[in-house]
Amino acid sequence: MAAEIIRDPVHGFVELEPYEVKLVDSRPFRRLRHIKQLGLTCYVWPGAEHSRFGHSLGVMHLATRVFDGLVGKGLSTRLSWNSEEQERWRRTLRAAALLHDLGHPPFSHATQALMPDDQTHHEEMSAGIVRSTEIEGILKAVGVDVEEVCELIVGEAPAVPQVLVDVLSGDFDVDRMDYLARDSLFAGVPYGSFDSDRLIRCLTLYPESSSKDPPVLALEIGGIHAAEGLILARYFMFSQVYFNKVRRSYDILLTDAMKKVLSASGGRYPSSVDDYLAWDDRSAWRAIEGLAGACNSAHRLLNRSHYRRVHETRELPEASEMDRFLRILAGLKDKYGQDHVIQDDAVQAPHRFLTSSFWVRELDRRFTPLDNPEEPPSRLILSLKPIMQRRVYATVDDEFDEMREFCNSFLTEGA
């Protein structure tokens, strides 16, 4: 019986075991209450104040649903698990799902470029936190292998079944299932909606039980429209929310301000776990406030004075449009100076849309890759292209109108 039940606005009741309550009450996990899921997106959509704390609970809940569904489709038999091993892996997956975002820096993805030199991704810091804080002891006390949890978090699986890695960080993983639904709900937009119940119900294993190869996550053809829904939700959320021009302007300002805050450590967060955990949105904001008189980015953040867009391409620019953008950008830099313009590229932003290979079981039980060009299970998914939008902002407000006119005249003249 669960030790505690939490009411989640996305998934309803989320159950926690006694040791999981201890994990949630630990210092590293409590910190997630003060790490906004979407940085300063709340400056654009006021409701988007949600944190990594709720998201982590949601990911654990969905991972459990997927695991239990796969067990019902023969996962334990395929991997030769007895009942004890099945329960052990269930606990391991739940722990990894719950703890996977411990390493996020303040304001989440907005300042991820400032991770320590030896930590290229927040997942690596998450694993370091698991290994070197009270979390390690909590896991060991209930027989959960700490290194297996860390492998799942990082996405490398020498000792972990690949199918469990797929559940947490694959093409249709529970992480994006939760953040799309959660971000959409709190931002108050409809773009992140998709049929998660149908998608989870139709997840299955590839290859078939007769194969000696270890299984990976796959999809029954009956769930293809739910899969399309998730892909489109990700596409639209990126286009409409994650790469919103104002939201991205605040990301740029946050990164610049925090570089100055962290100048003593080379413009990066500390690599020491204890020192890193001292940074959350609250401590970062206090530090930014302390720089308001000496840092333009800090001043702009505190006064909600974001950079303004002077020009951008379409989401899917043709080669000629991209070439024209680059010439406009060069012209702006030449006329106004390098420091007066900032370029932002969708290909560099988090959550960008990319198609990928994923196995789908047809009605005749034949498996086909999702991106099979000859007989795709979904022509809609195959037809989608990565968003390659590029944008330029003016850093000097007094020059904005003039720079806009420069861009317009450049376009009119066909330069």
Image (cartoon, rainbow, N blue to C red):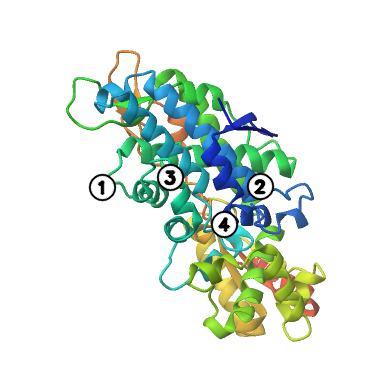
* First of labels 3, 2 by sequence position: 3
User: Gap between marks 3 and 2, in whole Å?
Assistant: 45 Å
Judging by the rendered image, the residue that carries numbered circle 1 is 158
User: Gap between marks 2 and 4, in whole Å?
Assistant: 32 Å
Judging by the rendered image, the residue that carries numbered circle 3 is 141
Q: Position of residue 208 (x, y in %)?
A: 25, 21
**Left of 57 or right of it: where is 151?**
left
Q: Amino acid at mark 4?
A: Pro
Judging by the rendered image, the residue that carries numbered circle 4 is 28
Q: Residue 255 shows which numbered tag?
A: none
* First of labels 1, 2 by sequence position: 1
Quadrant in which the C terminus is drawn: bottom right
Q: Residue 240 shows which numbered tag?
A: 2
User: Gap between marks 3 and 1, in whole Å?
Assistant: 24 Å
Q: Amino acid at mark 1?
A: Pro
Q: Can you say whether 131 is above or below 166 in the image?
A: below
Name the element at disc 2: helix
The mark closer to the camera, 3 or 1, is 3
Q: Amino acid at mark 3?
A: Ala
The crowding category of the residue bearing disc 3, from other C-alpha atoms within 10 Å (few below 14, some 14 to 19, many at least 20), is few
